[in-house]
Image (spheres, rainbow, N blue to C red):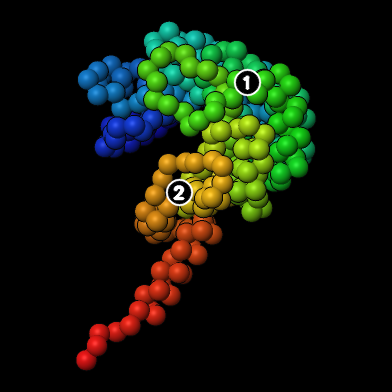
Amino acid sequence: MAGTAEVVTSMEKLPGVTYQVLVPNEKGLENVLSLLAAHPDNPPVDEIAVFTAATDAFSLANTNATVTDSLKRLAPVVLSALERGIRVRGYVSVVITCPYGGKVDYRNVRDVTKELLDMGCYEVSLGDTTGTGNPTSVGEMLSVTLGANPVEKLAGHVCSQSTSRRRPSHLFFQFHDTFGMGVANSMAALSAGIRTLDSSIGGLGGCPYSPGATGNVATEDILYALQDSPYSAPGDLEALVDVGFWISEKLGRDNYSRVAKAIRARRKRDHQTQPGPRL
Protein backbone atom coordinates (compact mmCIF):
# COMPACT_ATOMS: atom_id res chain seq x y z
CA MET A 1 0.00 0.00 0.00
CA ALA A 2 1.18 3.54 -0.71
CA GLY A 3 3.70 4.82 1.80
CA THR A 4 4.22 1.48 3.58
CA ALA A 5 7.94 1.25 2.85
CA GLU A 6 8.57 4.81 4.00
CA VAL A 7 6.67 4.29 7.24
CA VAL A 8 8.13 0.92 8.29
CA THR A 9 11.71 1.87 7.47
CA SER A 10 11.40 5.09 9.47
CA MET A 11 10.25 3.38 12.67
CA GLU A 12 12.49 2.27 15.49
CA LYS A 13 12.01 -1.47 15.66
CA LEU A 14 11.67 -2.63 19.25
CA PRO A 15 12.40 -6.16 20.54
CA GLY A 16 9.40 -8.28 21.39
CA VAL A 17 7.08 -6.35 19.04
CA THR A 18 5.58 -7.84 15.89
CA TYR A 19 5.49 -5.53 12.87
CA GLN A 20 2.75 -6.38 10.41
CA VAL A 21 1.70 -4.81 7.12
CA LEU A 22 -1.52 -5.13 5.18
CA VAL A 23 -1.17 -6.89 1.82
CA PRO A 24 -4.28 -6.68 -0.40
CA ASN A 25 -2.95 -8.62 -3.39
CA GLU A 26 0.10 -10.17 -5.09
CA LYS A 27 1.48 -6.75 -6.01
CA GLY A 28 1.41 -5.82 -2.33
CA LEU A 29 3.36 -8.96 -1.46
CA GLU A 30 5.93 -8.16 -4.15
CA ASN A 31 6.46 -4.78 -2.50
CA VAL A 32 6.97 -6.44 0.89
CA LEU A 33 9.45 -8.93 -0.57
CA SER A 34 11.40 -6.09 -2.18
CA LEU A 35 11.44 -4.28 1.16
CA LEU A 36 12.74 -7.35 2.97
CA ALA A 37 15.41 -7.93 0.31
CA ALA A 38 16.62 -4.35 0.75
CA HIS A 39 17.03 -4.83 4.53
CA PRO A 40 18.30 -8.40 5.02
CA ASP A 41 20.06 -7.69 8.32
CA ASN A 42 17.19 -5.85 9.99
CA PRO A 43 13.86 -6.82 8.40
CA PRO A 44 11.35 -4.00 9.01
CA VAL A 45 8.38 -6.40 8.66
CA ASP A 46 7.72 -9.68 10.50
CA GLU A 47 4.44 -10.75 8.95
CA ILE A 48 1.67 -9.76 6.57
CA ALA A 49 -2.08 -9.45 6.92
CA VAL A 50 -4.64 -10.41 4.29
CA PHE A 51 -8.31 -9.51 4.49
CA THR A 52 -11.75 -10.29 3.16
CA ALA A 53 -15.31 -9.91 4.45
CA ALA A 54 -18.35 -11.93 5.45
CA THR A 55 -20.60 -10.31 2.82
CA ASP A 56 -20.26 -9.67 -0.89
CA ALA A 57 -21.65 -6.15 -0.53
CA PHE A 58 -18.89 -5.03 1.83
CA SER A 59 -16.19 -6.88 -0.08
CA LEU A 60 -17.25 -5.23 -3.34
CA ALA A 61 -17.23 -1.79 -1.73
CA ASN A 62 -13.85 -2.38 -0.11
CA THR A 63 -11.89 -4.33 -2.75
CA ASN A 64 -14.16 -4.45 -5.81
CA ALA A 65 -14.41 -8.23 -5.54
CA THR A 66 -16.92 -10.72 -4.16
CA VAL A 67 -15.93 -12.78 -1.14
CA THR A 68 -15.30 -15.80 -3.36
CA ASP A 69 -13.12 -13.79 -5.74
CA SER A 70 -11.22 -12.16 -2.90
CA LEU A 71 -10.39 -15.56 -1.42
CA LYS A 72 -9.16 -16.73 -4.81
CA ARG A 73 -6.90 -13.66 -4.99
CA LEU A 74 -5.56 -14.24 -1.50
CA ALA A 75 -4.71 -17.94 -1.85
CA PRO A 76 -1.54 -17.44 -3.96
CA VAL A 77 -0.49 -14.50 -1.77
CA VAL A 78 -0.67 -16.62 1.39
CA LEU A 79 1.07 -19.58 -0.26
CA SER A 80 3.89 -17.43 -1.61
CA ALA A 81 4.41 -15.74 1.76
CA LEU A 82 4.49 -19.04 3.63
CA GLU A 83 6.98 -20.50 1.16
CA ARG A 84 9.29 -17.61 2.08
CA GLY A 85 8.84 -18.09 5.80
CA ILE A 86 6.58 -15.05 6.27
CA ARG A 87 3.74 -15.45 8.75
CA VAL A 88 0.24 -14.51 7.63
CA ARG A 89 -2.76 -13.27 9.59
CA GLY A 90 -6.24 -13.24 8.11
CA TYR A 91 -8.98 -10.70 8.74
CA VAL A 92 -12.72 -11.04 8.21
CA SER A 93 -14.70 -7.79 8.22
CA VAL A 94 -18.38 -7.23 9.17
CA VAL A 95 -18.91 -10.42 11.16
CA ILE A 96 -22.04 -9.10 12.94
CA THR A 97 -23.74 -6.62 10.62
CA CYS A 98 -22.91 -5.17 7.21
CA PRO A 99 -23.53 -1.46 6.49
CA TYR A 100 -24.96 -2.42 3.09
CA GLY A 101 -26.81 -5.65 3.86
CA GLY A 102 -27.79 -5.60 7.51
CA LYS A 103 -27.49 -8.66 9.76
CA VAL A 104 -24.82 -11.08 8.62
CA ASP A 105 -25.39 -14.80 8.13
CA TYR A 106 -22.96 -16.21 10.69
CA ARG A 107 -22.46 -19.29 8.53
CA ASN A 108 -20.62 -17.00 6.11
CA VAL A 109 -18.28 -15.95 8.93
CA ARG A 110 -17.71 -19.61 9.77
CA ASP A 111 -16.94 -20.62 6.19
CA VAL A 112 -14.69 -17.67 5.34
CA THR A 113 -12.76 -18.16 8.57
CA LYS A 114 -12.20 -21.82 7.76
CA GLU A 115 -10.95 -20.98 4.26
CA LEU A 116 -8.41 -18.52 5.62
CA LEU A 117 -7.17 -21.01 8.22
CA ASP A 118 -6.97 -23.75 5.60
CA MET A 119 -4.89 -21.44 3.38
CA GLY A 120 -2.32 -21.23 6.15
CA CYS A 121 -3.18 -18.12 8.15
CA TYR A 122 -1.94 -18.73 11.69
CA GLU A 123 -4.63 -16.42 13.07
CA VAL A 124 -7.93 -15.04 11.86
CA SER A 125 -9.36 -11.78 13.19
CA LEU A 126 -13.13 -11.54 13.38
CA GLY A 127 -13.95 -7.87 12.96
CA ASP A 128 -17.13 -6.22 14.20
CA THR A 129 -16.42 -3.46 11.70
CA THR A 130 -19.68 -1.57 12.18
CA GLY A 131 -19.41 -1.79 15.98
CA THR A 132 -23.06 -2.85 16.25
CA GLY A 133 -22.45 -6.13 18.07
CA ASN A 134 -23.44 -6.80 21.66
CA PRO A 135 -22.53 -9.72 23.95
CA THR A 136 -25.56 -11.71 22.75
CA SER A 137 -24.84 -11.37 19.03
CA VAL A 138 -21.13 -11.93 19.57
CA GLY A 139 -21.88 -15.11 21.48
CA GLU A 140 -24.25 -16.34 18.77
CA MET A 141 -21.74 -15.61 16.02
CA LEU A 142 -18.95 -17.40 17.90
CA SER A 143 -21.16 -20.40 18.53
CA VAL A 144 -21.71 -20.80 14.78
CA THR A 145 -18.13 -19.99 13.77
CA LEU A 146 -16.58 -22.41 16.24
CA GLY A 147 -18.73 -25.17 14.74
CA ALA A 148 -16.19 -25.50 11.93
CA ASN A 149 -13.23 -23.93 13.73
CA PRO A 150 -12.96 -25.81 17.04
CA VAL A 151 -12.08 -23.99 20.22
CA GLU A 152 -9.07 -26.32 20.53
CA LYS A 153 -7.48 -24.16 17.83
CA LEU A 154 -7.69 -21.08 20.00
CA ALA A 155 -4.46 -19.91 21.62
CA GLY A 156 -4.39 -19.82 25.40
CA HIS A 157 -2.13 -16.80 25.53
CA VAL A 158 -1.15 -13.64 23.68
CA CYS A 159 0.73 -14.51 20.48
CA SER A 160 4.37 -15.35 21.04
CA GLN A 161 7.21 -14.21 18.81
CA SER A 162 7.92 -17.71 17.55
CA THR A 163 10.15 -17.98 14.50
CA SER A 164 8.45 -21.11 13.21
CA ARG A 165 6.80 -20.88 9.81
CA ARG A 166 3.50 -22.27 11.02
CA ARG A 167 2.06 -21.75 14.48
CA PRO A 168 -1.19 -23.18 15.88
CA SER A 169 -4.18 -21.59 14.17
CA HIS A 170 -6.54 -19.56 16.30
CA LEU A 171 -9.02 -16.73 16.21
CA PHE A 172 -8.92 -13.26 17.65
CA PHE A 173 -11.32 -10.35 17.81
CA GLN A 174 -11.33 -6.80 16.54
CA PHE A 175 -14.15 -4.80 18.13
CA HIS A 176 -15.11 -1.31 17.07
CA ASP A 177 -16.76 0.77 19.78
CA THR A 178 -19.43 2.60 17.79
CA PHE A 179 -22.22 1.75 20.25
CA GLY A 180 -19.99 1.59 23.33
CA MET A 181 -20.07 -2.21 23.45
CA GLY A 182 -16.39 -2.84 22.72
CA VAL A 183 -15.36 -3.76 26.26
CA ALA A 184 -18.49 -5.83 26.96
CA ASN A 185 -18.01 -7.68 23.68
CA SER A 186 -14.37 -8.31 24.49
CA MET A 187 -15.34 -9.86 27.81
CA ALA A 188 -17.93 -12.02 26.03
CA ALA A 189 -15.26 -13.21 23.59
CA LEU A 190 -12.93 -14.05 26.47
CA SER A 191 -15.67 -16.09 28.10
CA ALA A 192 -16.07 -18.02 24.84
CA GLY A 193 -12.39 -18.93 24.77
CA ILE A 194 -10.87 -16.14 22.68
CA ARG A 195 -7.50 -15.12 24.09
CA THR A 196 -6.29 -12.44 21.68
CA LEU A 197 -8.09 -9.12 21.35
CA ASP A 198 -7.31 -6.31 18.94
CA SER A 199 -7.49 -2.81 20.38
CA SER A 200 -6.05 0.61 19.62
CA ILE A 201 -4.59 3.30 21.82
CA GLY A 202 -7.12 6.05 22.46
CA GLY A 203 -9.68 4.25 20.28
CA LEU A 204 -7.87 5.11 17.05
CA GLY A 205 -9.15 3.74 13.77
CA GLY A 206 -12.29 3.57 11.70
CA CYS A 207 -13.38 2.37 8.29
CA PRO A 208 -14.27 4.51 5.25
CA TYR A 209 -16.60 1.81 3.96
CA SER A 210 -18.61 1.60 7.17
CA PRO A 211 -20.38 4.96 7.56
CA GLY A 212 -20.54 6.10 11.17
CA ALA A 213 -18.20 3.43 12.50
CA THR A 214 -15.70 4.63 15.09
CA GLY A 215 -12.26 3.25 15.88
CA ASN A 216 -11.33 0.05 17.64
CA VAL A 217 -12.08 -0.39 21.31
CA ALA A 218 -9.46 1.52 23.32
CA THR A 219 -6.51 -0.43 24.70
CA GLU A 220 -6.74 1.53 27.94
CA ASP A 221 -10.37 0.41 28.43
CA ILE A 222 -9.52 -3.25 27.81
CA LEU A 223 -6.62 -3.21 30.25
CA TYR A 224 -8.76 -1.58 32.94
CA ALA A 225 -11.52 -4.16 32.41
CA LEU A 226 -8.99 -6.98 32.88
CA GLN A 227 -7.86 -5.69 36.27
CA ASP A 228 -8.71 -8.11 39.11
CA SER A 229 -9.97 -10.64 36.55
CA PRO A 230 -8.71 -14.20 35.95
CA TYR A 231 -6.95 -12.87 32.84
CA SER A 232 -3.74 -10.93 32.53
CA ALA A 233 -2.32 -8.72 29.82
CA PRO A 234 0.94 -6.82 29.48
CA GLY A 235 0.93 -3.05 29.52
CA ASP A 236 1.40 -0.07 31.83
CA LEU A 237 -2.04 1.53 31.99
CA GLU A 238 -0.81 4.89 33.29
CA ALA A 239 1.84 5.13 30.56
CA LEU A 240 -0.67 4.12 27.88
CA VAL A 241 -2.97 6.92 29.01
CA ASP A 242 -0.14 9.39 28.39
CA VAL A 243 0.54 7.91 24.95
CA GLY A 244 -3.15 7.99 24.05
CA PHE A 245 -3.50 11.69 24.81
CA TRP A 246 -0.21 12.47 23.07
CA ILE A 247 -1.14 10.77 19.78
CA SER A 248 -4.70 12.12 19.89
CA GLU A 249 -3.40 15.66 20.30
CA LYS A 250 -0.90 15.13 17.46
CA LEU A 251 -3.73 13.98 15.20
CA GLY A 252 -6.09 16.74 16.29
CA ARG A 253 -8.76 14.32 17.46
CA ASP A 254 -10.56 13.42 20.68
CA ASN A 255 -9.29 10.60 22.85
CA TYR A 256 -12.17 8.10 22.85
CA SER A 257 -10.95 6.07 25.81
CA ARG A 258 -13.32 6.51 28.73
CA VAL A 259 -10.71 5.10 31.09
CA ALA A 260 -8.06 7.55 29.86
CA LYS A 261 -10.41 10.49 30.39
CA ALA A 262 -11.27 9.29 33.88
CA ILE A 263 -7.61 8.85 34.81
CA ARG A 264 -6.73 12.30 33.46
CA ALA A 265 -9.60 13.80 35.50
CA ARG A 266 -8.37 11.96 38.60
CA ARG A 267 -4.85 13.24 38.07
CA LYS A 268 -6.12 16.80 37.73
CA ARG A 269 -8.22 16.46 40.88
CA ASP A 270 -5.30 14.99 42.85
CA HIS A 271 -3.04 17.79 41.69
CA GLN A 272 -5.56 20.46 42.73
CA THR A 273 -6.04 18.96 46.19
CA GLN A 274 -2.35 18.66 47.00
CA PRO A 275 -1.41 21.01 49.87
CA GLY A 276 0.59 24.05 48.91
CA PRO A 277 4.02 24.94 50.31
CA ARG A 278 4.09 25.70 54.00
CA LEU A 279 5.13 29.29 54.81
Q: Position of residue 126 (x, y in %)?
A: 62, 32
Q: Position of residue 154 (x, y in %)?
A: 59, 25
Query: Which amino acid is tagged 2?
Result: Ile
Using the rendered image of the protein, determine whether residue 191 is visible from the camera's viewpoint. Answer: yes
Quadrant assignment, res 245: bottom left
Q: Position of residue 209 (x, y in %)?
A: 61, 40
- According to the image, label 1 marks what residue? 152
User: Tag 2's secondary structure?
Assistant: helix
Q: Position of residue 173 (x, y in %)?
A: 59, 35
- According to the image, label 2 marks what residue? 201
Identify the residue shown where x is 77% and y is 30%: 105
Identify the residue shown where x is 24% and y is 88%: 278
Q: Vertically, is 133 above or below 2?
A: below
Q: Vertically, is 50 above or below 198?
A: above
User: How far separated are the C-alphas under marks 1 and 2?
Assistant: 30 Å
User: Tag 1's secondary structure?
Assistant: helix
Q: Is residue 41 left or right of residue 61?
A: left
Q: Residue at the bottom extreme?
A: 279
Towards the viewer: 218 or 192: 192
Identify the residue shown where x is 26% and y is 37%: 12
Using the rendered image of the protein, determine whether residue 104 is visible from the camera's viewpoint. Answer: no
- Total of numbered circles in the picture? 2
> Within 10 angstroms of label 2, few (less than 14), some, or many (20 or more) residues?
many
Q: Which quarter of the rendering shows the N terminus? A: top left
Q: Vertically, is 241 above or below 268?
A: above
Q: Residue at the top extreme?
A: 83
Query: Which amino acid is tagged 1?
Result: Glu
